[in-house]
């Protein structure tokens, strides 16, 4: 049974500490403290020059979080997507735009003809890299890692997100390609996956992604807390207030960029509205920053709490770009 309610009340002191006063009625064991680390990442083409280069960045962020006893490390949307281009780094490196890189790829018989084909063919490889990097770090540091998202390829109609894609399936394009978040537990294994539901024009028209199933979305359980997840544009749809009703913590993963931005609404303004309307306890938004060829992303990341029902910032990574690991400790009591 989940807590009936969890109220996050901020008391910001010295570094970044939050005081959380919940009303709980549960049979599950709960912790009095919960520490969340938000890894705001700055990317570039060089980050995806090799899996080793990428892994070094992730390891440094996780170790920084672990040094401050984080229970959960949150990475942003799209962080793992461009691992699919690592085998073609030389082509990417010689290009100044995504369109130019795709033209060069199209002229190479050894490279997929379309972005969709590229991500379908590289999906299993990217997932294997993620499982190795994030899984090993989660196990070694004994914490949870919400590893951002990647483009996952499943056989069309498959119910199991871990289903494999035979080569003939790829050739016939009988495949669903989704923007998927992945959560790793302290044993290094995947404990939760969720696909983005509301796609941008960029994702739908240029990449050929498929929308996730809203009815399949459930909470991720972390240290006895119910975590509700949204992925970027999902946040702008009020239906999530029902889906994530009374979640203990609402986590939004985002890559907000001018190439596919649907409006100038600020995620750090929308998330507090969703928290209040859903009666959720508080929220985290993890932002991707940096550039990849001519694509651009901007911050800011934040941890948001409620004070007497009003949403307020608990702590914010203020820079519009740049890497930062924001660590906040939530403390809460139980009410009989």
Image (cartoon, rainbow, N blue to C red):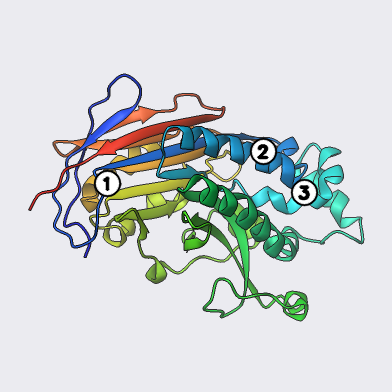
Which residue does the image show at 53% across and 57% down from the upper left?
188
Left or right: 230, with 195 as reference point: left
Quadrant in the picture for the N terminus: bottom left
Name the element at disc 2.
Answer: helix
Q: Position of residue 193 (x, y in %)?
A: 48, 62
Label 2 environment density (alpha carbons within 10 Å; few <14, some 14–19, many ≥20): few
Mark 1 or mark 2, earlier in chain: 2
Q: Choose mark 2 or mark 3, whichever is in front.
A: 2
Q: Is residue 103 above or below residue 326?
A: below
Left or right: 322, with 227 as reference point: right
Q: Position of residue 40 (x, y in %)?
A: 51, 35
Label 3 environment density (alpha carbons within 10 Å; few <14, some 14–19, many ≥20): many
Estimate the spatial distance between the alpha carbons at disc 1 and disc 3, rounded to whole Å. Answer: 38 Å
Mark 1 or mark 3, earlier in chain: 3
Name the element at disc 3.
Answer: helix
Q: Nearer the viewer, residue 46 or 224?
A: 224
Q: Mark 3 = which residue? A: 86
Q: Nearer the viewer, residue 22 or 44?
A: 22
Please indicate, yes or no, whether residue 289 appears anywhere in the rendered image.
no
Estimate the spatial distance between the alpha carbons at disc 2 and disc 3, rounded to whole Å. Answer: 15 Å
Q: Is residue 33 above or below residue 1?
A: above
Could you tell me if the residues under marks 1 and 3 are in contact, i.e. CB atoms within 8 Å?
no
Which residue does the image show at 27% across and 54% down from the upper left?
247
Mark 2 or mark 3, earlier in chain: 2
Please indicate, yes or no, whether residue 2 appears anywhere in the rendered image.
yes
Q: Mark 1 = which residue? A: 275
Q: Mark 2 = which residue? A: 56
């Amino acid at each position: 049974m989940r807590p009936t309610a969890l109220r996050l009340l901020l008391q910001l002191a010295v570094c970044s500490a939050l005081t959380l006063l919940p009303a709980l009625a549960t049979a599950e064991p709960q912790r009095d403290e919960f520490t969340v680390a938000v890894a705001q990442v700055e990317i570039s083409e060089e980050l995806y020059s090799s899996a080793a280069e990428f892994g070094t960045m992730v390891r440094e962020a996780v170790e920084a979080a672990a040094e401050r006893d984080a229970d959960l490390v949150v990475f942003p949307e799209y962080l793992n997507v461009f691992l699919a281009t690592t085998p073609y780094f030389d082509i990417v490196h010689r290009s100044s735009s995504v369109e130019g890189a795709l033209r060069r790829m199209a002229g190479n018989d050894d490279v997929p003809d379309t972005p969709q084909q590229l991500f379908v063919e590289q999906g299993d490889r990217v997932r294997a890299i993620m499982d190795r990097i994030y899984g090993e770090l989660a196990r070694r540091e004994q914490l949870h890692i919400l590893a951002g998202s990647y483009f996952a390829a499943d056989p069309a109609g498959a119910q199991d997100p871990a289903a494999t894609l035979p080569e003939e399936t790829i050739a016939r394009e009988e495949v669903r390609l989704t923007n998927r978040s992945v959560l790793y537990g302290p044993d290094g294994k995947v404990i939760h996956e969720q696909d983005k539901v509301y796609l941008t024009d960029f994702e739908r028209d240029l990449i050929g992604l498929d929308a996730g199933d809203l009815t399949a979305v459930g909470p991720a359980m972390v240290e006895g807390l119910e975590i509700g997840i949204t992925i970027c544009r999902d946040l702008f749809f009020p239906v999530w207030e029902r889906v994530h009703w009374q979640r203990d913590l609402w986590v939004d993963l985002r890559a907000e960029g001018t190439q596919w931005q649907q409006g100038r609404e600020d995620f750090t303004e929308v998330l507090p509205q969703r928290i209040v309307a859903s009666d959720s306890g508080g929220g985290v938004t993890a932002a991707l920053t940096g550039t990849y060829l001519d694509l651009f992303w901007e911050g800011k990341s934040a941890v948001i709490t409620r004070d007497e029902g009003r949403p307020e910032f608990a702590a914010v990574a203020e820079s519009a770009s740049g890497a930062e690991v924001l660590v906040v400790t939530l403390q809460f009591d139980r009410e009989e």
